[in-house]
Image (tube, helix red, strand yellow):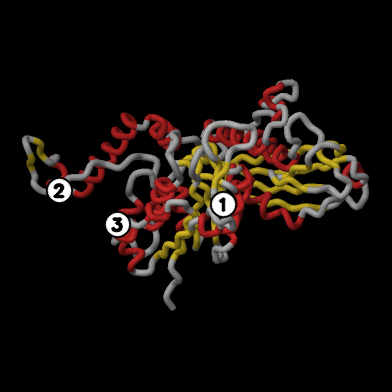
Amino acid sequence: MAMAPYRLDVVSLAPQAFAPLPELGVIGRAFGNQIAELHLHNPRDFTTDRHRKVDDVPYGGGAGMVLKPEPVFAAVEAIPRCERCRVLLMSPQGQPLQQADLQRWATEHDQLVLLCGHYEGFDERIRSLADEEISIGDFVLTGGELPAMTLINGVVRLLPGTVGTAESLVEESHSAVLLEHPHYTRPAEHRGSAVPDVLRSGNHAAIEDWRQQQREQRTRERRPDLYARWTMAQEPHPSAMQIRIGNGYDIHRLVAGRPLILGGVTLEHPDGLGLDGHSDADVLVHAVMDALLGALSLGDIGKYFPPTDPKWKGADSLLLLEQVVELVKQRGWAVVNVDAVVIAERPKLKPHIEAMRSNIAARIRLAPEAVGVKATTNETLGPEGREEGISCQAVALLGQA
């Protein structure tokens, strides 16, 4: 039985920009051979006014126009969904695109929905449609079409049957930490520059040694950040632990007049209560951060985001989580998985668990399956049971990067 094509859905105000893709070498052949299929959706087709208006002036004033939420929501909601679907928002504020992301989407998902921004920006509520926000670099373009095409190219070429040999995908730059070695073909000499003798020697062991030396030299010269990571991974650590485990705990009081945010999801408490705190008081994300810091004996979040510092007043805890993950990465460790349990009498959290998992996974850069979030009550016992507050406990596992 043939596998269904990998489905790519793009929501864009400039769908004509994607017309060259079916003619683009091996990527085009992948579409022609039904390895992948591309569907384009223009939000303008989902407008309800006679002018087909998709943008409007920003609230609060300012230059430029902002992409309206209604046509984008309507376009996304009209897209048929596969079971393993991922929605990605092209945004300069997103996580930098990496080869590991392309490999993850190509192997763990059967469909990508790509949202392309336009104009000066998009209505903030559009972000709620996305599982992840992705950036291709620290610069601003007129729209998300070029980043989306870059991502499509990177994913489709990894699909089985697109590229002739699997080995060429494994050994290329960025699949491993080191950059790729130089390549040569005929003629053996061109304008005074000759192919290195070792490549013509027929000695495969010597060729592999030369290529490895070139990988190391190129990475050291061109990407010292990658070379540092590679060097650290090569150093023997006979007495060092290969994994670290951390525990995290947080509790915040329930009060009137505050939002109730858990795992980046804003909830409605039956009595209109929210969590009191200096930041957004997201106890779930706070417990996860404490677990990550605890795994490396780095203290707790109060050390890095003190409640006495006005800079963190009302801060989005998911953004703070990104900073903690970067600190873990700088220490040479990677997050393997996290597991958390939220203790609350009300509201019912089960309908929101998947959104919480997805939010946390995106900020840690893990697959959602590597993030566990559970909810329980305290059977009316203790501060959680009396609805004086909501608490969370979390465990994190780190491995050496």
Label 3 SS: loop
> Residue 370 placed where, x, y %?
60, 52
Please give the residue where the numbered disc 1 appears in the rendered image.
367
Q: Which of the image's four quarters has the N terminus?
A: bottom left
Q: Which residue is drawn at 32% across and 31% down?
A: 222
Mark 3 crowdedness (10 Å alpha carbons): few <14, some 14-19, many ≥20: few
Q: Quadrant of residue 219?
A: top left
Give the CA separation, mark 3 to mark 1. 30 Å
Residue 335 % position (x, y):
58, 43
Please report whichever mark, 1 or 2, sits nearer to the chain's N-terminal start: 2
Say what secondary structure mark 2 lies in.
loop
Determine which of the numbered discs, if any, sits on residue 24 in the image. 3
Image x and y of residue 383, in percent: 90, 41
Q: Which of 176 and 244 is in front in this view?
A: 176
**Furthest-bottom residue in this view:** 1
Q: How crowded is mark 1: few (under 14 residues within 10 Å), some or many (20 or more)?
A: some
Q: Mark 2 points at which residue?
A: 185
Residue 400 visible in the picture: no
Calculate the distance from the C-alpha at mark 3 to the C-alpha at mark 2.
24 Å
In screen coordinates, is 131 left or right of 212? right
Q: Which residue is drawn at 49% across and 53% down?
A: 114
Determine whether, in the image, residue 90 is placed left or right of residue 288: left
Q: Which amino acid does label 1 sit on?
A: Ala
Q: Front-most of 203 and 297? A: 297
Left or right: where 244 falls relative to 110 = right
Q: Which mark is residue 4?
A: none
Q: What residue type is labelled 2?
A: Thr
Q: Which amino acid does label 3 sit on?
A: Leu
The single residue placed furthest to the front in the displayed view is 50
